[in-house]
């Protein structure tokens, strides 16, 4: 009887240890170019990248373009202003644009990951309200400012950046509070889904997918290859 009494608690303890061991064994390591530290939801939101917009995207002067509109190489970036990996990639793409002046144009598309970034959509809509008054120059300055102050994302920062750009603040506030550009932001997101983007940053160099916050050397190699392909 005494052995039978001990058997049940011992078996429970052993079972618990096996479960813990299994969890430790199956936990996968995080990737430094595409995962945040917040939750497992980030894995599905930032890791899966496939597909290409080649032949499906039409770039026009209405798009948010940085660089020469007639440049032979196009970088299309689907981005989220609250994404830490987009913040990491941002200076890399600015460096590419500076090194390949006249040869590369950078097209910004909104891809807010609302499930994990509550300020992603508000920030995107605020950037469009800035664009409404200042065009692409102001839009890109707002994007730069948002990434530089990513920890402060919120209405107060958006108003501050708008004020620094000389916007009519009443017009900006009306635009932002009415969510005037929610459909435009949503359209970018749906376009990204159709082209295979599943996380941010999701970039394409002349149609070739470059997922994640990859190092400068990776982007440089992709641009060099794109230029070589045009010869």
Image (tube, grey):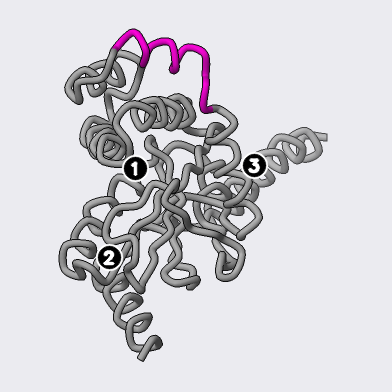
Q: Position of residue 129 (x, y in %)?
A: 40, 25
Q: Position of residue 165 (x, y in %)?
A: 20, 25
Which of the two residues, 71 or 31, is positioned nearer the viewer here? 71
Q: Quadrant of the C terminus?
A: bottom left
User: Residue placed at 43% from the left, 46% from the top?
Assistant: 79
Residue at the spot of label 3: 16
Q: Position of residue 58 (x, y in %)?
A: 54, 59
As helix, strand or loop, the secondary structure at mark 1 comes to helix
Q: Is residue 20 magenta?
A: no
Which of the two residues, 16 or 202, is positioned nearer the viewer here? 202
Q: Quadrant of the N terminus?
A: top right
Between marks 2 and 3 in the image, the one whose residue lies nearer the viewer? 2
Question: Circle 2: is it few (<14), some (14-19), or many (20+) Cα within 10 Å?
Answer: few
Q: Position of residue 131 (x, y in %)?
A: 36, 32
User: Residue placed at 31% from the left, 36% from the top?
Assistant: 139
Q: Is residue 210 above or below residue 16?
A: below
As helix, strand or loop, the secondary structure at mark 3 comes to helix
As helix, strand or loop, the secondary structure at mark 2 comes to loop
Residue farthest toward the bottom in the current orientation of the protein: 231
Q: Determine the image quadrant of residue 142.
A: top left
Question: What segment is highlighted magenta in the picture?
Answer: 169-181
Residue farthest toward the top in the current orientation of the protein: 170
Between marks 1 and 3 in the image, the one whose residue lies nearer the viewer? 1
Q: Main secondary structure of the magenta part?
A: helix
Residue at the spot of label 2: 215
Q: Is residue 147 above or below residue 98?
A: above
Q: Is residue 176 magenta?
A: yes
User: Residue placed at 56% from the left, 64% from the top?
Assistant: 53
Residue at the spot of label 1: 84
Q: Is residue 122 above or below residue 97?
A: above
Closer to the N terminus: mark 2 or mark 3?
Answer: 3
Closer to the N terminus: mark 1 or mark 2?
Answer: 1
């Amino acid at each position: 009887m005494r052995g039978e009494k001990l058997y049940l608690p011992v078996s429970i303890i052993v079972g618990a240890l096996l479960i813990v061991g299994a969890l430790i064994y199956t936990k996968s390591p995080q990737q430094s170019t595409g995962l945040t530290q917040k939750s497992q939801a980030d894995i599905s939101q930032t890791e899966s990248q496939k597909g290409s917009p080649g032949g499906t995207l039409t770039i026009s002067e209405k798009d948010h373009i940085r660089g020469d509109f007639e440049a032979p190489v196009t970088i299309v970036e689907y981005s989220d202003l609250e994404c830490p990996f987009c913040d990491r990639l941002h200076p890399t793409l600015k460096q590419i644009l500076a090194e390949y002046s006249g040869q590369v144009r950078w097209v910004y598309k909104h891809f807010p990951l609302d499930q994990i970034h509550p300020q992603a959509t508000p920030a995107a809509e605020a950037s469009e309200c800035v664009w409404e008054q200042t065009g692409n120059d102001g839009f890109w300055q707002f994007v730069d400012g948002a990434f530089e102050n990513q920890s402060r994302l919120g209405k107060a920062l958006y108003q501050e950046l708008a004020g620094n750009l000389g916007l009519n603040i009443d017009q900006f506030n009306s635009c932002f509070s009415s969510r005037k550009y929610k459909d435009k932001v949503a359209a970018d997101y749906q376009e990204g889904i159709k082209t295979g983007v599943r996380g941010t940053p999701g970039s394409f160099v002349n149609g070739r997918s470059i997922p994640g916050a990859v190092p400068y050397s990776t982007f440089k190699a992709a641009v060099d290859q794109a230029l070589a392909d045009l010869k």
